[in-house]
Amino acid sequence: MEVHKIIFFRNFLFRTFIIGVLFAIFLGVITLTFWDSWVSLSQHFFKIDEKELGELMLNFFMHVRLILLFLFLAPTLALHWMVKGKK
């Protein structure tokens, strides 16, 4: 693979990782801000109590973290090392 293609994919994955982190932080702030509304809506529509909703939200953010780290950051670091090795 040519060096400029590796650099392009590395920069693409890193920028995707940064946007994903910012999006996760935004979702976390919105979730914490509107927690009472989420609880009442989930109880009304889905019959989920606050404890179950908390577990669901924690599970969601754990999955987001895993996706960001292993699908975006790990390949970015690998491509970064490849670029350093070719220079």
Image (cartoon, rainbow, N blue to C red):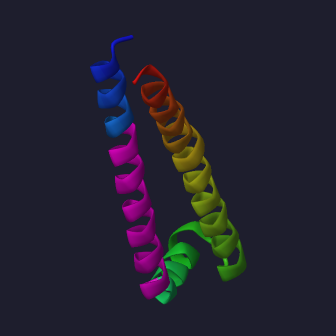
Answer above or below: position of 19 versus 26.
above
Q: Quadrant of the N terminus?
A: top left
Which residue is located at x 33 percent, y 47 percent?
15
Image position, residue 18 (x, y; %): 38, 54
Residue at 47% across, 37% down:
76
Q: Which residues are magenta?
A: 13-34
Image quadrant containing the C terminus: top left
User: Is residue 27 shown in magenta?
Assistant: yes
Q: Nearer the viewer, residue 86 or 66?
A: 86
Q: Locate residue 34: give its quadrant.
A: bottom left
User: Residue 30, how many percent across, how many down?
Assistant: 40, 77
Quadrant of the rendered structure where residue 64 is?
bottom right
Residue 48 visible to an observer of this rendering: no
**Residue 78 or residue 64, whichever sits in front:** 78
Give the vertical position of 71 relative to 28 (above or below).
above
Is residue 45 left or right of 17 when viewed as pictured? right
**Residue 57 horizontal side relative to residue 34, left or right:** right
